[in-house]
Amino acid sequence: MDLHQRQLFDFLFFTAVERYSERLEQRLGGAETALAKLRSDPNGDEVRLDSFSRNFFADFLLDNLEGACFVLQALARRDLPAHAGGKVADVLQEHALDVFSSLLAAKTEEVLEQHSGYQPMSG
């Protein structure tokens, strides 16, 4: 991957982490609760990791074959989950979403852990 493409992906990805972690903290009343919910049920009604990733892909025009290839190229060293067969474009897009969502969850956990350390202690 060219350096300018890597820089673009990093910008997009960190934008996703920032938006997602902020949304979770606001919706769930703080970083600790958000972190617990993300870890226990990343696709539950309150967290909606896959839904966020799909919407993010659509917002940044990554919800197509070229976008999927861009994401997969940037995340080439990550493991892919098993998928049922289908059209190549559909399978690549699903893989891109899965890998992106997995990394997004991990990085969001890191951000929420950092934020929970800065919250005032109750008591």
Image (spheres, grey):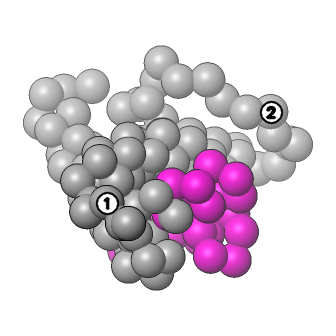
Across and down, in percent, residue 74 comes to 36, 32
Q: What crowding class fits label 2: few (fewer than 14 Cα within 10 Å), some (14-19), or many (20 or more)?
A: few
Nearer to the camera, 60 or 25:
25
Across and down, in percent, residue 104 comes to 45, 48
| Number of the label disc, if any, that sits on residue 82 | 2
Query: Outermost residue, front direction?
Result: 123
| Amino acid marked by disc 2 | Ala
> Does 37 appear in magenta?
yes
- Reply above or below: 12 against 52: above
Q: Quadrant of the N terminus?
A: top left
Q: Earlier in the sequence, mark 2 or mark 1?
A: 2
Q: For marks 2 and 1, give the one nearer the viewer.
A: 1
- Reply above or below: 80 against 7: above
In-image side of 15 versus 98 (left or right): left
Q: Give the range drawn in magenta.
A: 34-62
Q: What crowding class fits label 1: few (fewer than 14 Cα within 10 Å), some (14-19), or many (20 or more)?
A: few
Residue linked to disc 1: 121
Residue at 70% x, 46% y is 91
- Reply above or below: 59 against 17: below
Across and down, in percent, residue 85 comes to 86, 42
Nearer to the camera, 35 or 66:
35
In-image side of 86 versus 105 (left or right): right
| Amino acid marked by disc 1 | Met
Q: In which quarter of the image is the C terminus?
A: bottom left
